[in-house]
Image: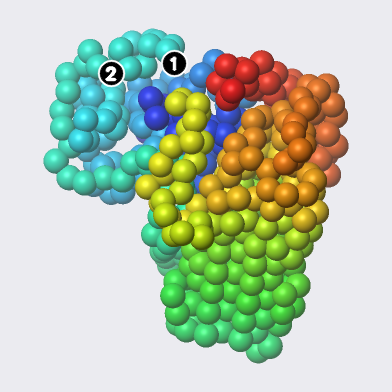
């Protein structure tokens, strides 16, 4: 059975990461939301997203008349309810549309109107819908544990050498084929540890679960990792990291602290970049709201850095508590930069200048080529849309 994942009215809560991808391709635990649906023999064939993303993420249209909210984390009960949906019916949960089934064709802008006109049925159980970007780390312990259980069920872990110190239950450590683990310590007492295919843990690392090191990712020598943390595919991480998510292809290769944070793809944190994740007075952290265009209360005491794709920091950069950085930004210089840095900005505490679009193409093309990935015409169009839209949506 094929489904389409749709981004709904809370899509702005997942910016800046949602500037460059559907919400369903955010990493929640070890896998993306879209990948989790495979556990239930449901294939995500398409994404209902704004037009500027459609060319990249829906290159070939495949018809599927079951639409599911991108923010929904699937479980067997909600999947059963979705499978049994009648035609021209919407499934709701606490006033939010979870899924709907229709033969009508419609655009992204018509989404709310379409499912609002269908027969409404309320889901009687409980389900989990992501509400904001910080949910990716505040709920990452559960996400990692659930993914670990599903991905390792009935399988055998690769072995671990005697020079690796394992503290806690041995069956909560799973190592995929091709992973290389040099002398280090791994503590599974507080949660499982997953080491992906062809990943590398260099000597001297200290890991405390829940933790996921995804395919082809690496931990640099002496890294200190606190759960619940996810290091996505092809990332390189060093220094100290706690309760953070790196979606993939991003580097924090040197000393410095990253806590209660989310980094998109193709980001790079320079040596000794540090994030503050707690205010000195322990009060609630304010973060940037792209719809309100101002800092608003987050409901959280611990929030570090939220960074969009292709953004970078120079050596010794200091990020204040609850900083949001857009896409294709470059932060450098002394002092604390502002808590909100728009996309395509270059500078720091002394001010910013716009980053030229053509130069952003050149940098992205070089960076992605290092991993054997093309910077496509669709990527260029997305960059152009973000840049053109930044004046109205981020100012």
Give the structural element (helix, strand or loop) at label 1.
Answer: helix
100 lies above or below 240: above
- Mark 1: few, some, or many residues within 10 Å (few <14, many ≥20)? some
Dots 1, 2 in contact, CB < 8 A: no
Q: CA distance from mark 1 to mark 2?
A: 11 Å
If the image is split into quadrants, where does the N terminus sit? top left
Q: What kind of element bears circle 2?
A: helix
Residue 328 is labelled as none
Residue at the image position 33 percent from the left and 41 percent from the top? 129
On screen, residue 90 above or below 258 = above
Residue at screen point 42% across, 13% down: 109
What residue sits right under mark 2 in the picture? 115
Q: Is any atom of residue 393 visible in this view? A: yes
Rate crowding at label 2 as few (under 14), some (14 to 19) or many (20 or more) other CA atoms within 10 Å: many
Residue 151: % across, % down: 47, 59
- Report the front residue among 345 and 389: 345
Identity of the residue furthest to the bottom in this view: 162
Q: Between 288 and 131, which is closer to the camera in this rendering?
A: 288
Residue 263 in the image: state x and y as whole percent.
Answer: 61, 47
Quarter location, residue 292: top left
Residue 385 visible in image = no
Is residue 72 found left or right of 126 in the rendered image?
right
Left or right: 263, with 220 as reference point = left
Residue name at image x 35 percent, y 31 percent:
68
């Amino acid at each position: 059975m094929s489904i389409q994942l749709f981004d709904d009215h809370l899509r702005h809560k997942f910016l800046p990461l949602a500037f460059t991808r559907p919400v369903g391709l955010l990493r929640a635990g070890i896998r993306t939301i879209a990948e989790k649906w495979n556990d239930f023999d449901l294939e995500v064939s398409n994404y209902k997203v704004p037009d500027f993303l459609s060319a990249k993420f829906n290159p070939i249209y495949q018809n599927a008349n079951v639409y599911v909210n991108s923010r929904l984390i699937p479980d067997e009960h909600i999947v059963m309810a979705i499978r049994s949906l009648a035609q021209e019916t919407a499934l709701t949960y606490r006033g939010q549309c979870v899924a709907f089934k229709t033969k009508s064709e419609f655009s992204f802008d018509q989404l709310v109107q379409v499912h609002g006109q269908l027969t409404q049925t309320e889901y009687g159980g409980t389900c989990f819908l992501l509400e904001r970007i910080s949910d990716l780390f505040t709920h990452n312990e559960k996400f990692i544990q659930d993914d670990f259980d599903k991905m390792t069920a009935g399988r055998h872990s690769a072995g671990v050498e005697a020079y690796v110190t394992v503290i806690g239950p041995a069956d909560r450590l799973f190592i995929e084929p091709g992973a290389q683990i040099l002398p280090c310590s791994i503590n599974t007492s507080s949660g499982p540890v997953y080491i992906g295919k062809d990943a590398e843990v260099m000597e001297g690392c200290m890991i405390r679960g829940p933790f996921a090191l995804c395919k082809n990712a690496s931990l640099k020598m002496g890294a200190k990792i606190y759960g619940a943390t996810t290091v996505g595919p092809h990332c390189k991480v060093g220094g100290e990291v706690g309760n953070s998510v790196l979606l993939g292809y991003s580097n924090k290769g040197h000393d410095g602290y990253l806590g209660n944070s989310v980094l998109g793809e193709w980001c790079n944190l320079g040596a000794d970049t540090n994030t503050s994740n707690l205010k000195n007075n322990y009060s609630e952290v304010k973060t940037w709201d792209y719809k309100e265009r101002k800092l608003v209360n987050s409901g959280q005491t611990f929030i570090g850095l939220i960074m969009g794709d292709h953004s970078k920091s120079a050596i010794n950069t200091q990020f204040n508590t609850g900083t949001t950085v857009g896409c294709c930004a470059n932060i450098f210089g002394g002092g604390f930069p502002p808590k909100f840095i728009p996309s395509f900005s270059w500078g720091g505490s002394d001010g910013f200048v716009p980053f030229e679009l053509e130069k952003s193409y050149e940098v992205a093309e070089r960076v992605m080529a290092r991993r054997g990935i093309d910077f496509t015409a669709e990527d260029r169009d997305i960059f152009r849309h973000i840049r053109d839209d930044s004046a109205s949506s981020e100012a």
